[in-house]
Amino acid sequence: MTEATSLVDALTPEMSRRDSMALLIRAFEAAGIADAASDARLLLCAAADIDHADLIRDPEAPLDEFARELLAAYGQRRFAREPVTRILGTRGFWSLDIEVAPDVLDPRPDSETIVDAALKILGERQNDPLRIADLGVGSGAILCALLDIFQNASGLGVDVSPTACALATRNLRTCGMMTRGRVENGMWESLEGGHFDLVVSNPPYIASNDIPGLDPEVRNFDPGLALDGGADGLDAYRSLGATLPRVLAPGGIAIVELGQGQAAAVGLIFREAGLLILGVQNDLAGVERVLIARKMPNSEGKSPPATLSSVSPLGAGQKSD
């Protein structure tokens, strides 16, 4: 199958769920789409309004006309490399279902590493009334996940995009967290602070010249504002380096997502800003995905810096501080 439009005619009333899914798999594989089988299954289940168990129980059931037309439309969009999460409008993130929308970054599983690192380093304070800030909140996925874990915490999301702020607010509401979370539209540099126990961020970190080479699912569907980190990919980290020492409480923790190979450079930026680098944590693929830093306690007598046994020192041969 070479043209997506042929999906409309190829999905016939006589075709079963199994055969319809097989048709999509062949089309996606021909387009060079990874995870063709998984994508086809998700789209078929959504179009037919069934779950995976229903598909397994009755794979030979036919699709009604509405489901066929919807599946053809879904298939054409995926054939054009639109991500499944954007087609369906939701993304599973941590233990939550997060709404995704055009013009807002689609949260990736890699970003769950931020949440995992926060749980590891602050797990003993899980019942404390922590004050959390998410700088560049996007969809609100990370903030919602943190508020779900730290159920006595309050959270603030900040984003320059009004569209992102509206989406993050909807996700906070859907997840039942509006009483503890709120979102502000603006630049994180203007955030008043000095009192956050945890600050997280998934900033734009792709070097400008690298964006044309990204997968079409990212390049064509994620907003450039959420991707473009400037000439070397580090512009947002320089801004964070100026912001974090001001907004963190003494002894507060900062956890930021990294692009591949950026740990040493971001660590240097943060050290020069006066932060103590605790280390980095890898994602499930073994990539150094987040950097963890701490604002040094003041002379009033705070607890010593926490450590993460599962976090590696910053880069081979790098002195953490």
Image (spheres, rainbow, N blue to C red):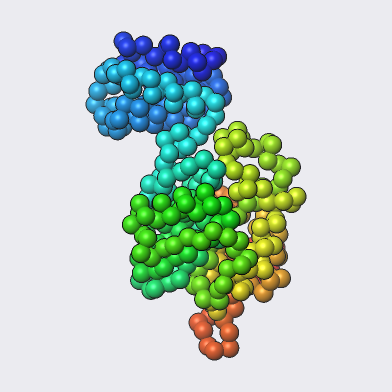
Task: Looking at this view, name the residue that lies furthest to the bottom.
Answer: 300
Residue at the outermost left position: 57
- In the rendered image, the vertical position of residue 98 relative to residue 215, given as above or below: below
The x and y percentages for residue 139 are 48, 50
Position in image of residue 182 (x %, y %):
44, 62
Query: Is residue 118 at least partly visible in the picture?
Result: no
Residue 143 in view (yes/no): yes
**Within the image, what quadrant is residue 41 found in?**
top left
Q: Position of residue 154 (x, y in %)?
A: 41, 68
Point out the image quarter for the C terminus: bottom right
Is residue 289 placed above or below 309 in the rendered structure?
above
Q: Tell me which residue sits at (47%, 67%) in the image.
A: 132
Total labels drawn: 0
Q: Is 208 rendered above or below residue 24?
A: below
Viewed as shown, does residue 148 lie left or right of 229?
Answer: left
Residue at 55% in and 26% down = 80
Q: Residue at x 31, y 10 (%)?
A: 14
* Image x and y of residue 320, in percent: 65, 69
In the foreground, 262 or 100: 100
Point 52% across, 32% down: residue: 82
